Amino acid sequence: MTEPELLVPLTPDAAHPVSLVCIPHAGAGVASFHPWRELGGLAALWAVRFPGRESRVFEPPLTSIEDMAEALAPLVSEIAARTIVLFGHCSGALVAYEVAARLAQRRSSAADLLLVLSSQPAPFGRPQPAGRGIAGLSPADFADRLRALGGTPDVVLNNPQMMALMEPTIRADLLAVERYRPPAREALPYDIVVMAGRGDHAVPADSLQAWQDCTAGSFRIEWFDGQHFFVSEDGKAVVRYLAELLRSIG
Amino acid sequence: MPETGQRTAGAFTEQELATIVLQTWQRALKNSQLGPDDDFFTAGGDSLLVDEVTAAIAAATGIEIPVVTLFINPTATEFADAILELAGTGGTGHDRT
């Protein structure tokens, strides 16, 4: 069956006044947001499937955060909602920020926007990658890196067939994050909520706080139990929190 | 090769295979409402579940199924069809890495 390729509706009620648009972590697609369908009464739920994953596994991945945002921004601006909550996890957080910057610049969306960003340092003053960058990692070292970060099951890491399919896309996404150097720009007119795992050693707390400089609106950090992938580790608390958030704007 | 037009996969008819595939997917995705034309990934299928259902259906049918099969055939209908092709050609019996 032919599906909408980039922005996939996960709940049928696309006419809801609030839309929650979910941008996944490096290498991931729409499946990771399936548990969030229970938010369906509170918002229309959309998830992003970039080329190179899931049913698009053989399409070459986009290689920069800006390219991903360019592809996504027009679709987000077409959503007929009063409020759009843009959620991005890991690499997806940077894509969400870049989409928001485009919408702010073009004033192309009548909707209010709220940015919810998780497990990702702010765009400016980003910590340099420790040791060799992603591009210099052998497949074995890259697998070790993913293992240390969590989020990629051992069944996948230990399956050469699976890794052959997934590694190029995960690598392309992480490389895009590593190379991302946004232009200096004014703070966005949108509120920002940062979500973070208390045990996430990959993302220092001050780099999360630095997101505050990206908004002229309100800012707060919400902490959850878990590490880089607290969104699934502490999944129930995350859904509870998002439900509360959506109710407050609904 | 049977020339009756009735395709088979191992010991199974096309119909039986379609049922095996759909029921395996429904169990793995914990969704008894999943239809034969629903997208596996949109229905919550992640890489772990790709591996699980591919292995389960390979075990049930005795047909070697490369992991890539589900990615390029993301509905139960397409996946069952791909297995019939695999069974017909016997092309992937020995190259599973």
Image (cartoon, coloured by chain):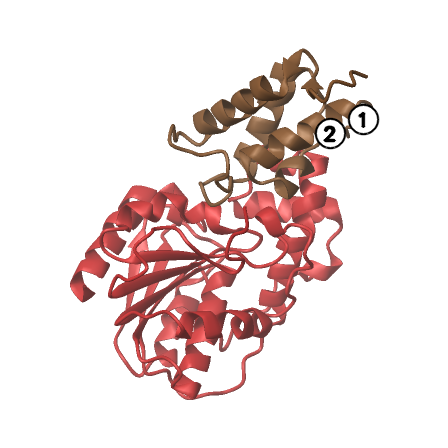
From the top left corner, tell me how far across and down residue A233 is, in percent.
39, 42
Q: Are marks 1 and 2 in contact (CB under 8 Å)?
A: yes
Give the camera-side residue of A75 and A198: A75
Quick check: A99 above or below A144?
A: below
**Which residue in the structure is indicated by mark 2?**
B85
Q: Is residue A202 visible?
A: yes
Q: Amino acid at mark 1?
A: Thr
Q: Residues within 10 Å of mark 2 (few under 14, many from 20)?
A: some
Give the camera-side residue of A199 and B95: B95
Q: Residue at x 52, y 21 (%)?
A: B19
Q: Amino acid at mark 2?
A: Glu
Q: Quadrant of residue B14?
A: top right
Q: Which chain is indicated by disc 1?
A: B
Q: Is residue A114 left or right of residue A66?
A: left
Q: In the figure, what tint was chain A given?
A: red
Q: Quadrant of residue A175?
A: bottom right
Q: Quadrant of residue A34?
A: top left
Label 2 sits on a secondary structure element that is: helix
Q: Residue at x 26, y 61 (%)?
A: A16
Q: In the figure, what tint was chain B given?
A: brown
Label 1 sits on a secondary structure element that is: helix
- Which dot marks residue B89? 1
From the top left corner, tell me how far across and down residue A90 is, in percent.
48, 59
